[in-house]
Amino acid sequence: TKKWWLFPVSQTPFVLPSLNPNGFSAHSGTKIGKGDEIPSPWLSKLERYTVTLQPGDVMLNPPWFWHGIRNMESSAEGGLSIGVPTRYATPGMQAAFRSNWFLSAIGFV
């Protein structure tokens, strides 16, 4: 079981974004409450969608949405996660640039 928080791209200025040192991905300074961390106090003010996935469920993470994930079961209970990223350079990258040219471009910086 996994709990997901999804934040639309309109919330980007409010999630405290920064580019990872690898220059390929970004992360947020907003904490959702994984493990022992305390959720950020402004989390409840952000526009977001929350979903809990059960075994066998499939979810599509919309393009450019920020997301946080909490595994609800312990690692001792098992739980296999399979992710399929679709943001890498492909012949169809024009669609990514049309949907958000700025965030697409910083992926190549």
Image (cartoon, helix red, strand yellow):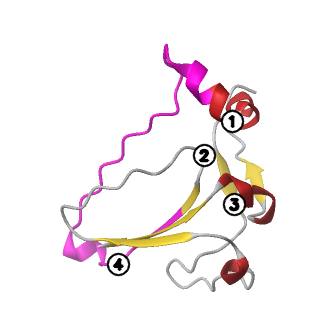
What span is colored magenta in the figure?
A: 68-96
For badge 1, the amino acid type reads Asn
Residue pointed to by mark 1: 100
For badge 3, the amino acid type reads Ser
Q: Are marks 2 and 1 in contact (CB under 8 Å)?
A: yes
Q: Are marks 2 and 3 in contact (CB under 8 Å)?
A: no
Which of the marked residues, 3 or 4, is nearer the chain's N terminus?
3
**Label 1 Cα neighbours within 10 Å, binned few <14 / some 14-19 / many ≥20:** few
* Residue under the image location 70 percent in, 46 percent down: 20
Name the element at disc 3.
Answer: strand
For badge 4, the amino acid type reads Met
**Label 2 Cα neighbours within 10 Å, binned few <14 / some 14-19 / many ≥20:** some
Residue 28 shows which numbered tag?
3
* Residue under the image location 48 percent in, 73 percent down: 50
Q: CA distance from mark 2 to mark 4?
A: 24 Å
**Label 3 Cα neighbours within 10 Å, binned few <14 / some 14-19 / many ≥20:** some
Q: Is residue 85 above or below residue 10?
A: above
* Residue under the image location 30 percent in, 49 percent down: 82
Q: CA distance from mark 2 to mark 1?
A: 8 Å
Q: Nearer the viewer, mark 4 or mark 1?
A: 1
Frontmost residue, 58 versus 25: 58
Q: Is residue 59 above or below residue 106?
A: below
Q: Nearer the viewer, mark 1 or mark 3?
A: 1
The spot of residue 47 in percent (x, y) is 66, 70
The spot of residue 101 in percent (x, y) is 72, 30
Secondary structure that dominates the magenta span: loop
Q: Is residue 20 above or below residue 80?
A: above
Residue pointed to by mark 4: 72
Name the element at disc 2.
Answer: loop
